[in-house]
């Protein structure tokens, strides 16, 4: 495959991400920030984001598995997650986080579960 | 959303609780269930009371009645007794007469005839007696002799010959009325016999018990007196009396008829019934007078004792009322009235209480509803704010995408579509921002800034915004600011601009021809001129006729009529020229206003548009109300702008009002309070903020040729701002004359006219050839020193006209209206070939390049606990050339910011674990204050020069601009906030405040 095709694919993919609302304007802004002084800026930020996200999601999972869920802790993690996702322009993640935080404040674990499922997660069964 | 619902619910619950506790129950309210019982109790009380009243009055009545009865009875008894005793005395006298003349005289002086005559003639003395008679005591031994002497036998009461007894008492003398009893033996009647015996024993008048009298068969009593034949010894014994008694004088009282007569003489005879009894035998009273069983009132009686002079007999008079006591209507009605009044009073009180209860209930209900309505209103505002905010986010996405789309290669149609979409999106964002503004104002969250700004440049900016549109429509758009208005004022430039933009925007929207004229004056001067207004108008009216030329009937900016007549030239002239000419007079006010901190400006925006229909004028300032539903169809808009403007004006401490005449135009004017800049501060700020006008034109001379004074004044105002000395001529001829004069007078000093600005209307109206000639004429006059440059002023100009103008000598330039000082300056620079460097510098004030210039080389600290955020923020700032360092927590930031440090600014995330942005800022400030104190304490050589001792600009970064309370940021010592993720414009605005002066000097 030649580079041109790859680039086109990349553009298409990015466009589809925009279209389906995975990304928003912020990501465009982010890409604008990349210039010759800072050639790998987007890559750097995105990988940071993924690292962070993994850590945060794991932390959250841990917190939620506790017999007594500490909502404040979960909320703190979600807040972080929301912050980074909005910075990077991960629109959907940000929205899920926002909803998630709402339920955290209410301490509504049913809602949380719904959100987790909606986000594609799984709920550990508790005997 | 669920959370919000819950919080609303809890708010409602809290409100209810509050209501419950707040509800002050009054006494009546608390006892509402008792009210009917109170009423019944009251009625009963009233009934008892009125009954009591009745009883009291009735008792008084009865007492009075009894008293009357007693007095009447006693009166009757006394009269009867008196009359009786008179009669008795008379009979006594008669007895003495008989004893004197019958026994002590010998022979007897009295015979039957004498006695009869005497008694008949003295009968008036004895009205109670039906008659008197004298009976002689005759013993049985003497009977025969006595019968022989008189010639008749002694008879009994039954008129038979008397049987033999021990003693007889035949009547020998008798009054004529009772002559039938002559020769009857008185002792033969049981009653009489007893009487005689008792009389002779006592020697006193004695009465019989009542019996039917012989003649009349009336009830009567017989009075008997003993007559003694010899004088009795003092204190005679009974035997002596019997021995001495010679006969008996008797009289019959016809009690019945007598009492009848007696009573007949007295008043009130009908009312009472009188009975007279003989009660000698108290167990069996004998009736003497009156019927025993009569229909009388038995309830009340009075007994009066009668003494008829016979101690053996007792008599009594009993009086009764003839009729039963009549019902006492007065007392009955009085009592009833009492009852009725009581009832009414009770009912009124009850009604009042019920009413109070009802009103209070209603009041509480209303209060509750009010609270609910207010809560709903707050909820509405909140909802509006939230929704607007929520809409704004995706809208930004749309706009961003559209911008990106426009960057790509598009066909012209596609580009058109995309541009339209972008324009619409921008309009929508504006609307949303307006709604947000309104919601903020309603929630009282909007606070005005107080920063120094240049009013004139803001007005110029606004004008430039609309210049395209107005030029397109062929409207005159002009602004004029009075000289008295200070150059710099303190206020909120953004909001001021918003108001002006709104008003001018409306005017532009609704005006098809004519002009839009923005004026700014000091409110005091405007007010001062109001007094002279009437006079002015009169004077103005007289000259208007004289100077009307070229078909302009109204001396306004464009010649079209304006709604507010007072804004026409006559007044404007006063506003502008009075300030100059009568400066002495106005100096006083100017001085006083100079001294005060505040300056109140009066801004008016006049247009010659379609005006506001009269019926819609009342609701112009109501949000979402347009004059007409057709208005929004024809002109678009939501009608929220004016209501926001009104709110803003009120926040600025002023008032907005308007005068509008349909089809003629509207004039909106408002007042607003601004702070006055202090002189020294002003000079500092001038450099940074307002001094964007070049100074190279100072001292130049210009002539403005314009037939319309208002327009000429506007032109003059703009030129004056550039420091150009201006004279006004109403036609080119006059201009030539003026400039010629100037030229000749001051030619030596090179002070000739540099510029001639000709209004297009004035030029077109004059003859071309004429003009050329004059120009030719002028050239020699100009002494070839400097030919004045010719500039044409036009609102819109066709290319043909433009060519013509060039041909006519306006080779130099055409300045398109609306005039703005900066634009005029640019054009004049072009004409006069003066330096243009500054102009370029000014262009850089916008866009990322400027941001770059602001941030370039600055050392900036970014504090955020989120790695990604930190990286992005750093990237963005680096993009603009800043030197960025990062800290991942408040503590780390504090470490880095230990004094002395070399950071120029700090961007601080608010929500961080351990130490949040507020706390970190507070600590940084503490450290700074300490350091400053030390510095000042130790030495103050630089003093005022290093004004910015230690003060690191700290900007909050927050994702939530709406909810991040700006107040809180300021409270803990932050200098502003930027939204996260960074938006260029937002960043620029925030940063520009701090780095303003530096880049200019750097450049």
Image: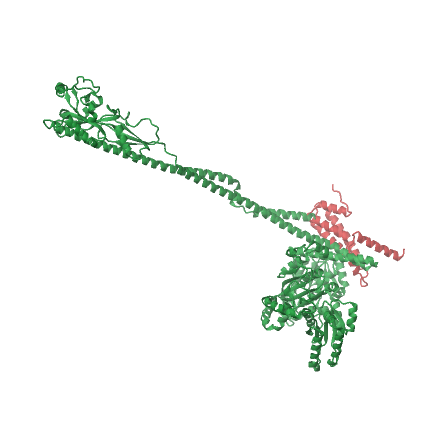
Which of B715 and B366 lies nearest the eye of the viewer?
A: B715
**Position above or below: B840 against A52:** below
State the residue lying farthest toward the left.
Answer: B106
**Residue B92 spot, x, y in % from top left:** 18, 30
- Looking at this view, name the residue that lies furthest to the right: A1
Tell me the quadrant of the picture where the C terminus of chain B can be found: bottom right
Of residues B550 and B273, which is closer to you in this image?
B550
| Camera-side residue of B789 and A5 | B789
**Quarter-wise, where is residue A44 in the image?**
bottom right
Residue B604 falls in image quadrant: bottom right
Residue A29 location (% of width, % of height): 78, 59
The residue depicted at 74 percent of the width and 51 percent of the height is A95
On screen, B933 above or below B629? below
- State how many labels appear: 0
Does residue B374 appear in this view? yes
Q: Is residue B422 left or right of residue B937?
A: right
- On the image, the x and y values in percent for residue A65 come to 73, 46
Indicate the colour of chain A. Answer: red
Chain (green): B
Q: Residue B867, can we see it?
A: no
Q: Is residue B485 left or right of residue B781?
A: left
């Amino acid at each position: 495959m030649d580079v041109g095709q790859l680039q086109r694919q990349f553009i298409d993919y990015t466009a589809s991400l925009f279209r389906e609302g995975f990304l928003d304007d912020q990501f465009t802004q982010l890409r604008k920030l990349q210039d010759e002084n800072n050639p790998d800026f987007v890559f750097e930020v995105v990988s940071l984001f993924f690292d962070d996200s993994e850590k945060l999601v794991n932390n959250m999972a841990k917190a939620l598995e506790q017999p007594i869920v500490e909502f404040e802790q979960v909320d703190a993690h979600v807040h972080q997650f929301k912050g980074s996702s909005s910075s990077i322009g991960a629109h959907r993640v940000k929205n899920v986080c926002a909803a998630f935080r709402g339920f955290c404040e209410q301490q509504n674990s049913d809602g949380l579960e719904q959100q987790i499922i909606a986000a594609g997660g799984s709920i550990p069964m508790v005997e | 959303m669920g959370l919000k619902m819950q919080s609303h619910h809890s708010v409602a619950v809290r409100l209810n609780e509050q209501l419950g506790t707040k509800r002050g129950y009054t006494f009546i309210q608390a006892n509402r269930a008792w009210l009917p019982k109170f009423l019944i109790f009251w009625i009963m009380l009233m009934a008892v009371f009125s009954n009591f009243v009745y009883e009291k009055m009735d008792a008084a009545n009865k007492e009075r009645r009894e008293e009357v009865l007693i007095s009447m009875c006693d009166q009757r008894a006394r009269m009867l007794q008196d009359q009786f005793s008179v009669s008795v005395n008379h009979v006594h006298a008669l007895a003495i007469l008989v004893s004197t003349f019958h026994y002590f005289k010998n022979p007897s002086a009295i015979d039957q005839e004498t006695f009869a005559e005497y008694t008949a003639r003295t009968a008036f003395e004895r009205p109670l007696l039906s008659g008197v008679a004298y009976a002689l005591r005759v013993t049985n031994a003497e009977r025969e002799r006595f019968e022989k002497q008189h010639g008749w036998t002694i008879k009994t009461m039954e008129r038979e010959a008397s049987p033999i007894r021990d003693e007889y008492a035949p009547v020998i003398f008798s009054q004529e009325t009772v002559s039938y009893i002559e020769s009857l033996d008185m002792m033969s009647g049981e009653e009489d016999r007893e009487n005689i015996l008792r009389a002779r024993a006592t020697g006193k008048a004695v009465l019989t018990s009542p019996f039917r009298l012989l003649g009349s068969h009336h009830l009567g009593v017989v009075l008997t007196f003993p007559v003694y034949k010899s004088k009795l010894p003092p204190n005679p014994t009974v035997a002596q009396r019997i021995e001495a008694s010679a006969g008996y004088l008797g009289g019959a009282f016809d009690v019945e008829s007598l009492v009848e007569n007696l009573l007949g003489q007295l008043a009130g005879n009908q009312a009472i019934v009188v009975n007279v009894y003989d009660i000698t035998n108290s167990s069996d009273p004998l009736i003497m007078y009156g019927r025993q069983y009569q229909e009388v009132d038995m309830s009340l009686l009075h007994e009066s004792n009668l003494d008829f002079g016979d101690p053996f007999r007792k008599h009594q008079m009993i009086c009764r009322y003839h009729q039963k006591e009549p019902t006492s209507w007065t007392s009955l009605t009085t009592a009833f009235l009492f009852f009725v009044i009581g009832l009414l009073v009770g009912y009124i009180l009850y009604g009042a209480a019920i009413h109070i209860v009802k009103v209070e209930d209603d009041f509480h209900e209303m209060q509750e509803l009010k609270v609910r309505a207010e809560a709903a209103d707050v909820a509405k505002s909140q909802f509006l704010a939230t929704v607007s905010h929520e809409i704004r986010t995706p809208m930004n996405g749309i706009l961003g995408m559209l911008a990106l789309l426009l960057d790509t290669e598009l066909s012209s149609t596609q580009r058109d579509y995309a541009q339209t979409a972008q324009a619409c999106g921008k309009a929508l964002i504006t609307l949303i921002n307006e709604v947000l503004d309104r919601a903020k104002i309603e929630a009282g969250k909007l606070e005005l800034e107080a920063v120094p700004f240049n009013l004139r440049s803001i007005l110029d900016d606004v004008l430039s915004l609309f210049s395209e549109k107005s030029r397109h429509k062929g409207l005159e758009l002009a602004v004029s600011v009075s000289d008295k208005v200070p150059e710099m004022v303190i206020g909120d430039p953004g909001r001021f601009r918003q108001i002006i933009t709104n008003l001018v925007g409306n005017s532009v929207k609704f005006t098809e021809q004519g002009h839009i004229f923005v004026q700014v004056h000091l409110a005091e001067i405007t007010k001062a001129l109001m007094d002279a207004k009437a006079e002015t108008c009169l004077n103005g009216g007289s000259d208007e006729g004289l100077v009307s030329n070229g078909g302009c009937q109204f001396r306004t900016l464009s010649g079209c009529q304006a709604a507010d007549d007072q804004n026409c030239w006559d007044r404007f002239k006063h506003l502008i020229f009075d300030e100059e000419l009568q400066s002495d007079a106005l100096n006083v006010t100017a001085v006083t206003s100079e001294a005060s901190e505040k300056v109140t400006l009066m801004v008016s925006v006049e247009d010659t548009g379609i005006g506001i229909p009269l019926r819609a004028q009342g609701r112009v300032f109501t949000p979402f109300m347009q004059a007409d539903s057709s208005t929004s169809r024809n002109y678009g808009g939501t009608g929220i702008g004016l209501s926001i403007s009104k709110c803003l004006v009120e926040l600025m401490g002023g008032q907005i009002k308007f005068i509008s005449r349909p089809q003629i135009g509207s004039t909106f004017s408002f007042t607003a309070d601004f702070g006055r800049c202090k002189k020294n501060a002003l000079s500092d700020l001038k450099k940074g903020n307002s001094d964007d006008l070049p100074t190279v034109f100072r001292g130049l001379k210009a002539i403005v040729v314009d037939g319309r004074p208002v327009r000429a004044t506007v032109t003059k105002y703009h030129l004056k701002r550039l420091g150009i000395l201006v004279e006004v001529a109403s036609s080119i001829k006059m201009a030539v004359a003026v400039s010629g004069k100037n030229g000749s007078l001051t030619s030596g000093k090179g002070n000739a006219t540099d510029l001639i600005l000709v209004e297009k209307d004035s030029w077109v109206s004059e003859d071309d050839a004429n003009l050329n000639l004059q120009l030719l004429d002028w050239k020699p006059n100009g002494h070839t020193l400097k030919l004045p440059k010719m500039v044409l002023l036009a609102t819109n100009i066709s290319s043909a006209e433009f060519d013509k103008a060039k041909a006519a000598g306006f080779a130099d330039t055409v300045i398109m209206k609306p005039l703005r000082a900066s634009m005029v300056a640019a054009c004049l620079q072009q004409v006069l070939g003066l330096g243009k460097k500054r102009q370029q510098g000014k262009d850089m004030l916008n866009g990322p390049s400027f941001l770059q210039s602001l941030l370039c080389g600055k050392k900036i600290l970014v504090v955020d606990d989120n790695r990604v955020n930190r990286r992005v923020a750093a990237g963005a700032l680096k993009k603009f050339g800043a030197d960025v360092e990062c800290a991942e927590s408040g503590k780390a930031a504090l470490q880095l910011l230990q004094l002395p440090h070399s950071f120029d600014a700090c961007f601080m995330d608010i929500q961080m674990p351990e130490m949040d942005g507020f706390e970190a800022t507070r600590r940084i400030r503490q450290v700074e204050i300490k350091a400053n104190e030390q510095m000042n304490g130790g030495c103050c050589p630089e003093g005022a020069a290093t004004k910015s001792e230690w003060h690191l600009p700290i900007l909050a970064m927050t994702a939530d601009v709406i909810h991040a309370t700006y107040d809180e940021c300021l409270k803990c010592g932050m200098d502003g906030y930027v939204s996260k993720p960074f938006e260029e414009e937002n960043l620029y605005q925030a940063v520009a405040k701090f780095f303003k002066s530096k880049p200019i000097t750097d450049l």
